[in-house]
Image (spheres, coloured by chain):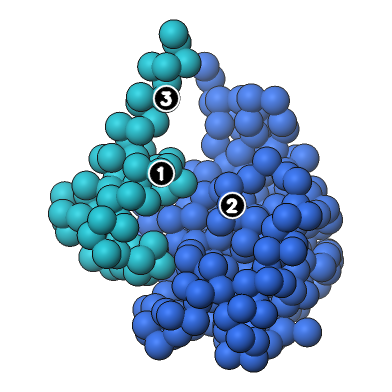
Amino acid sequence: MTGNLIQDLSPFQLEKKIRALVDADHRALPPKAKVFAAIADLQGFTKLPRLCTPGEIEDLIAAGGMELQRGIAASDAVPALLYARELARGTLHPGTKSAYGHGIYLATPSAVGDLPDFPRISEIARHYARSLHGPGIILRSVLRNVALPTIGEIQAHFREERNRARRAGIVELGAFAAACGFRGYRCEGIAPKPEEEIVVVLDRTALVFQRVALQIGAGIR
Amino acid sequence: METLHDRINRVINTDAFEHVLERHGIDLIDFQCSWSRESGGDFGKLRSEFQEAILAGEDDLSARREIALG
């Protein structure tokens, strides 16, 4: 159950719980990614999200949900579709890219799409779906009923809890925000479309994914 | 063209990047919360300590590649 682990547990207790999960995690991940994964597990953030139809997604948006999209590129050995399926239906991967902290990075769409199941497109998602290794995938999702602090507000929390976080071995943003009980946070947009907002989602269950994804063509080597 | 966001993602897990932040007494969390707001995506607008950390991380990665080539 989600709580504020930083305040509800002593730093020693929290550090011990995190370490037990990290020690049991044998994936080839950086240590800080494993700490994030441990905290996400403690908070119940790793369970599977809901999947739904494009029509249901539109209903959720109309009811006030926030549309978010994620671009996934193919790598040398792995098609993008495999990564996409893992994100929506598999074990949560904490990721290794953490400029804004560990979590699931998504962007708000800003462009008009030309497909009925994708009436809007995120240029940032499209950018990160591109690869020379094969077609990319854009996933469409809705974030429901989640209060999203800004990254600045999380930083203010950190300044109050800095010592407790350090003593519990929490040193990066996604892990800290998740430990505080936040389910996501907003960040400034990035190139190629700074007008789009980046949302780092920490609790995967807060997302509802559309079953129909969009395939983006591969580049020519 | 590689964005500042991409550059940071490449180096943020390197020891060299972390050591520069530590030397300047900067928490990683403060870096993660501040870099975008301060720079607007422009490396040249980052405070000098952040630039130093990123460049150190990139040097670290270059050195590793040179070792791998033997």
Which secondary structure, mark 1? helix
Name the chain under label 2: A
Q: Is residue A79 above or below residue A41?
A: above
The residue located at (69%, 47%) in the rendering is A214
Cβ atoms under marks 3 and 1 closer than 8 Å: no
Say which amino acid is labelled 2: Pro
* Pointers 2 and 1 within a single chain: no
| Residue matched to label 3 | B64
Relative placement, left or right, of A9 versus A185 is: right
* Pointers 3 and 1 within a single chain: yes
Chain letter of the blue region: A
The residue located at (47%, 73%) in the rendering is A166
Q: Position of residue A178 (x, y in %)?
A: 60, 75
Which secondary structure, mark 2? helix
| Residue matched to label 1 | B15
Q: Is residue B64 above or below residue A107?
A: above
Quadrant of the frame with the N terminus of chain A:
bottom right
Residue B23's label in the rendered image is none
Q: Is residue A46 above or below residue A213?
A: below
Name the chain under label 1: B
Residue A213 in view of the camera: no
Residue extending farthest to the top is B70
Residue extending farthest to the front is A12
As measured in the structure, the alpha-carbon distance from the residue carrying label 2 to the one carrying label 1 is 12 Å
Which secondary structure, mark 3? helix
| Residue matched to label 2 | A31
Q: Position of residue A2 (x, y in %)?
A: 72, 84
As measured in the structure, the alpha-carbon distance from the residue carrying label 3 to the one carrying label 1 is 12 Å
Colour applied to chain B? cyan
* Pointers 3 and 2 within a single chain: no
Cβ atoms under marks 3 and 2 closer than 8 Å: no
Which quadrant of the structure image shows residue A27?
top right
